[in-house]
Amino acid sequence: MSDFDATSNPEDAKLVTLARSSRARTGAAQGAAVRDTDGRTYAAASVALPALSLSALQVAVAMAVSSGAPGLEAAVVLAEHPGDAAGAAAVHDVAPSVSVFYFDSAGAPLS
């Protein structure tokens, strides 16, 4: 999705806000949010347990899929470093053409 704009589109800005608040609430390394094709949003934080390790984006995609989302139209990750190959792969399993956008903890885009 090439028209993602968190500065002028309120629905895109909402994803960044949800990802930021998920990360802040838990103190996790990552926060993520996705929007499905029905307009519903899902926000999550990364999980780091001895028996289970998931990126925030993997959790958000799992929440969307388990809630019956017909597809995804947007995905964002807040983390100190861009990149989440497993999370991006999960997004692309559901929606091959959706881009994943990365932001730092302040909500500034990462390249």
Image (tube, grey):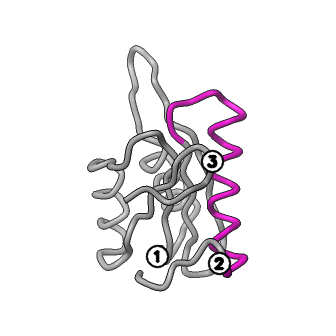
Q: Quadrant of the C terminus?
A: bottom left
Work out whether mark 3 precedes mark 1 in sequence or the reverse, and give the earlier one.
1
> Element type at marker 2?
loop
| Amino acid type for the residue under numbered disc 3 | Ala
Which residue lies most toward the top here? 50
State the residue at coordinates (72%, 34%). 25
State the residue at coordinates (52%, 78%). 4
- Disc 2 crowd, CA 10 A, few/some/many (<14, 14-19, 20+): few
Of the two numbered discs 3 and 2 in the rendering, the one whose residue sits closer to the viewer: 3
Residue named by callout 2: 39
Residue named by callout 1: 71
Q: Which residues are magenta?
A: 8-30
- Disc 3 crowd, CA 10 A, few/some/many (<14, 14-19, 20+): few
| Amino acid type for the residue under numbered disc 2 | Gly
Where residue 8 appears, as percent x and y from the top left, is 68, 81
What is the CA distance from the residue labelled 3 to the residue labelled 2? 25 Å
